[in-house]
Amino acid sequence: MSQLMGNIRRTTSAAGGASAEIYNLDFPRLLEKHKGAIERALPNHLSVDRIMRVALTAYRKNDSLAKCQPISVVAAVVQASQLGLELHQNGEAFLVPYEDECQLIPGYKGLMKLVRNSGLVRDIFAHEVRINDFFDYDLGAARRLVHKPMAGEGNFPAPDSSRGKVVGYYAVALLHDGTPTFVMKHQLDVDAIRDATRGYAAAKRRGNTTPWDTHPVAMGKKTLIRLLCNSQLPMSAELQIALQLDKADLMGVKQGIQLEQAADGSYEPPAFDNLPPVEVGDGNDGARQPAQSRPASRGSQGPRPEREATERAPQPPAERPQRTASPVRPAAAPRTPAPQPAPASTRSGTPRPPQSEAQPQHQDRLKSRAEQELDNELASMRSCREMVDLDEIVIRLEARYSGAPLELINRTYDEMRTQLNPTRRDLFTTA
């Protein structure tokens, strides 16, 4: 594999600083030259000729991929092969440019395929609910979900135009014993999840078209599939990697897929995620989903709004004034917690017993420097006057911090985003 990497680096370095025209010539040549290495990386059920044909088709149809480093496109193709996902043809995975790097973005069909392939779940599916459909559910010990699309001619589902606008989504998984588990979201909640992702926000600021604009229903289904996987399902290694690749796209950071790692199966997603596998913008509510929905009468037409606006990704307004770092100090060194109460989720630990006099002084000095650095970063965030500047700072900090400091950074981000874009406030204050 090291020889393969050397050959590819020499090929791509010869095109360093070259135009997109040279890059267009390089990519097909790279694929053909290293066909054997790609074939060795493929699972048995995938054809190397078909993978190469699909990759070339995607490359030629998407002019933006010509701006990517050819080696990153090859790496993304091989990584898709390692996961067992086919590119573009049936919506399992897509090649998407991000600056000069090709990103591998799994689609909702790809996520469902990985769930089924894991052997840990019997089946999984997602649907949109339209306003004229029949939708009902019960929670508690006897959970059930009933969705009957509006009937049309011959008792087949009516056309979407007759069923009306989409008002919500749900995703269901059947465990091996036949037990169903599901999550559901109102359209407003799905919109809030979408808007809270920095990748989407950055694309809209630049005036770029996103999959949410061209395929909103598919993206809504993907949001619910992702939430179900993260909150209630056992996950294979392949599914975990796919979800992390998708999260990198949501966070607006590079995936950093290296060809050598993709080919030998050792690729690990970016290190920004040291938290539990809950999607950014999913309201951190995946594990709490069964308790969120409120009981309602049976037989209602269309989904019943669950009024979950107070549990969405951004912290509620009541918590935003907590700007001081004391409730969520970095956990790098022990220290008696600040006297004011703080939410349980922000506590990095319990008070520790007293130590020797010299050691706490040293630890206090270390923590003081860490606190000062974090305070300076938070001050930089609060001084931003444009969302693009705020996003750049947060993306940089997410690669450095985790745990309680990252929660404080995210809370400050939500506070500043509301100030810089007050028209979004209504999404989180719906009665």
Image (spheres, helix red, strand yellow):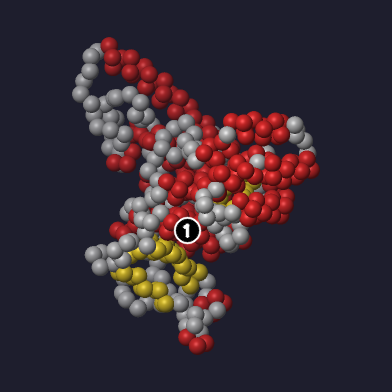
| Image quarter in which the C terminus is found | bottom left
Q: What is the tally of numbered marks visible in this picture?
A: 1
- Estimate the x, y position of residue 397 in percent, counting from the top left: 49, 33
Q: In this view, does 157 lie above or below 336?
A: below
- Estimate the x, y position of residue 169 in percent, counting from the top left: 45, 65
**185 or 2, which lies in front?**
2
Toward the top, the furthest residue is: 358
**171 or 264, which lies in front?**
264
Residue drawn at x 65%, y 41% is 34
Residue drawn at x 61%, y 60% is 89
Residue 16 appears in the rendering: no
Q: In which quarter of the image is residue 359?
A: top left
| Image quarter in which the N terminus is found | top right
Residue drawn at x 60%, y 41% is 37
**257 or 161, which lies in front?**
257
Residue type, numbered disc 1 = Lys
Toward the bottom, the furthest residue is: 154
Which residue carries the number 1 mark?
113
- Estimate the x, y position of residue 205 in percent, counting from the top left: 63, 48
Residue 155 appears in the rendering: yes
Q: Is mark 1 on a helix, strand or loop?
A: helix
Q: Quadrant of residue 16?
A: top right
Residue drawn at x 41%, y 43% is 320
**19 or 99, which lies in front?**
19
Q: Is residue 51 left or right of residue 381?
A: right
- Estimate the x, y position of residue 314 in percent, counting from the top left: 44, 48
